């Protein structure tokens, strides 16, 4: 009996040790574990699968996240680490210990989108199932073209319902019938008895920068007043218009450009979401007397990169073979070869200072983007209004119409730079016609038929891309005269966009 009792006692003493050993052999994943798996040659899919199936104790502070890519950790694994515990294991629990779930986090990511206009791009987010979107007013400016992009393949038109320059907030309206998987961000409840955000609380934002996937960044709210939330998240122009979430996943702020009278100095900061409520109510009232936005997809950038190794780099590159005048505007047809030359040449044969302005758009007009840019710069004090490109009798819908400002001693004038699919200028079109109008006389079109040598040159330079990936489809409008609405009216091309499959 004594021997049996000793065995029982020893077994009871051993159980905690076995349990501790089991915990030691199956510890939580750390940043170092991820680095070791990457260095061991495991694929990103294998590592992300391991993260999803394991308990984690990741350090997701800004300094720790910045260090991981330097050690070889790719972005998709970083995102998996963040999604495993979006706010970190040390997040203070509020409201009876509730914390945002992984499914709720994915819903928030699906609510964030990229906002496009003629004057730039930024971030926005859906806050109402009716398709209402908050963004920054300076991202929209006076643009007639407004669109929102959910991912690399889906972009739809948007309408401006209300805007306020003082708080730099704008409310857009989109038709979500085309995007059934869009998410909706929950705004903080103004009727709640508990404050929506507290100093010292962990917060995070999701940005949708130009040509990049949705970016998650976390931080801590260090100061909260009636108008502004101060946190340690680094913000820039691409984040402008994005949401700031509290530890429950409620939207408590909006990243925007705040003037000195609000933030103390002109800076990118976070406006309390309560400051947007009056403008939201104004937008809701306008919805009742405004037609719904068009439910159609707009053209997007092709995803395959242009094969830069096929570009021939001649010592003498004659830029004049790609340029011509249309009325009061100098036009440059920018194939990838032209853009590559502009980016790599130490000196361009032309002394035209207008080419210097393109340096501001270096990321936008990269040579590896398989698109055709048409750049119209003013020759006088005329300011660019809009451009129309015709393949045969039908107008080509641009991927993105943009404007570029020229500051002079007397005034500010604008040029136009439109992105089109590569085969928008093609011998298959027969005649290719370009129309340009100015702000001073928007109804008077300056028109030219492109020289056949220019058309043949564009065809030839895009041929390596066609051979590798095939010709992209063109979105074309109805020929003029076939509709009761003239296409020269601003922004009408969005309402008549009818993509046509290529044979």
Image (cartoon, grey):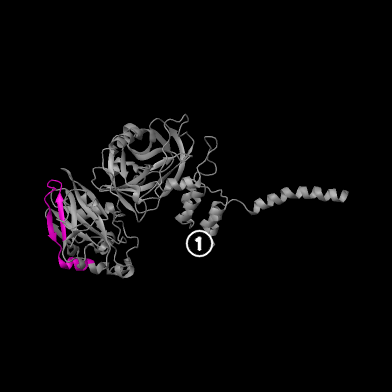
What residue span does the magenta drawing correspond to?
Answer: 433-458
| Residue 153 in view (yes/no) | yes
| Residue 268 lies in quadrant | top left
| Residue 350 in view (yes/no) | no
Depth check: 384 or 367 in front?
A: 384
Q: Horizontally, is 493 left or right of 370 in the view?
A: left
Image position of 499 with respect to 158: above or below: below
Q: Horizontally, is 439 left or right of 81 in the view?
A: left
**Residue 441, horizontal then vertical, whole percent:** 12, 47
Image position of 155 with respect to 189: above or below: below
Depth check: 393 or 92 in front?
A: 393
Q: Horizontally, is 152 left or right of 40 in the view?
A: left
| Residue 339 lies in quadrant | bottom left
**Residue 162, horizontal then vertical, whole percent:** 28, 38
**Residue 390, horizontal then vertical, whole percent:** 18, 59
How many residues crowd mark 1 within 10 Å: few (<14), some (14–19), many (20+)? few
Depth check: 185 or 454 in front?
A: 185
Q: Which residue is painted at 29% across and 40% down in the image?
A: 137
Asked whether residue 440 is drawn in magenta, I would say yes
Count all numbered tags in the image, as a single digit: 1
Quadrant where the C terminus lies?
A: bottom left
Asked whether residue 363 is drawn in magenta, I would say no
Q: Which residue is painted at 52% across and 58% down in the image?
A: 47
Q: Which residue is painted at 11% across and 50% down in the image?
A: 444
Task: Say which residue label 1 marks.
Answer: 43
């Amino acid at each position: 009996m004594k021997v049996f009792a000793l065995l029982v006692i020893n077994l009871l003493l051993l159980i905690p040790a076995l349990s501790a050993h089991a915990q030691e052999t199956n510890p939580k994943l750390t940043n170092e574990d991820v680095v070791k798996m990457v260095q061991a040659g495991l694929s990103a899919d294998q590592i992300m699968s391991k993260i999803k199936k394991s308990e984690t104790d990741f350090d997701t502070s800004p300094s720790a996240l910045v260090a991981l890519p330097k050690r070889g950790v790719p972005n998709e694994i970083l995102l998996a680490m963040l999604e495993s515990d979006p706010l970190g294991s040390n997040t203070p629990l509020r409201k009876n210990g509730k914390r945002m779930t992984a499914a709720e986090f994915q819903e928030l990511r699906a609510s964030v989108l990229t906002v496009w206009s003629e004057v730039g791009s930024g971030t926005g987010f859906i806050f109402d199932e009716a398709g209402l979107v908050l963004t920054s007013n300076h991202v929209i400016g006076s643009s007639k073209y407004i669109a929102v992009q959910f991912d690399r393949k889906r972009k739809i038109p948007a309408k401006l319902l209300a805007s306020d320059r003082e708080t730099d907030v704008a409310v857009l309206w989109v038709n979500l019938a085309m995007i059934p998987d869009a998410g909706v961000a929950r705004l903080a409840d103004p009727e709640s008895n508990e404050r929506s955000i507290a100093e010292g609380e962990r917060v995070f934002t999701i940005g949708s920068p130009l040509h990049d996937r949705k970016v998650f960044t976390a931080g801590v709210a260090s100061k909260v007043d009636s108008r502004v939330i101060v946190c340690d998240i680094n913000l820039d122009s691409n984040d402008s218009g994005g949401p700031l979430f509290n530890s429950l996943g409620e939207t408590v702020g909006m990243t925007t450009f705040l003037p000195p009278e609000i933030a103390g100095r002109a800076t990118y900061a976070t406006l309390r979401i309560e400051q947007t409520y009056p403008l939201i109510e104004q937008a809701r009232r306008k919805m009742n007397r405004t037609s719904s936005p068009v439910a159609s997809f707009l053209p997007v950038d092709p995803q395959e990169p242009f094969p830069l190794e096929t570009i021939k780099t001649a010592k003498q590159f004659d830029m004049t073979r790609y340029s011509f005048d249309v009325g009061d505007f100098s036009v440059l047809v920018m194939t990838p070869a032209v853009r590559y030359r502009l980016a790599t040449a130490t000196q361009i044969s032309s002394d035209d200072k207008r080419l210097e302005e393109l340096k501001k758009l270096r990321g936008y007009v990269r040579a590896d983007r398989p698109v055709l840019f048409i750049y119209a710069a003013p020759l006088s004090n005329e300011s660019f209004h809009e451009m129309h490109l015709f393949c045969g009798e039908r107008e080509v819908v641009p991927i993105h119409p943009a404007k570029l400002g020229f500051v002079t001693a007397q005034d500010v004038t604008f040029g136009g730079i439109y992105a089109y699919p590569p085969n928008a200028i093609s011998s298959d079109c027969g005649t290719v016609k370009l129309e340009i109008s100015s702000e001073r006389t928007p109804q008077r079109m300056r028109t030219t038929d492109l020289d056949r040598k220019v058309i043949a040159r564009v065809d030839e330079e895009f041929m390596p891309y066609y051979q590798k990936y095939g010709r992209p489809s063109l979105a074309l409008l109805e020929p003029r005269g076939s509709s009761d609405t003239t296409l020269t009216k601003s922004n009408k091309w969005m309402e008549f966009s009818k993509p046509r499959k290529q044979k």
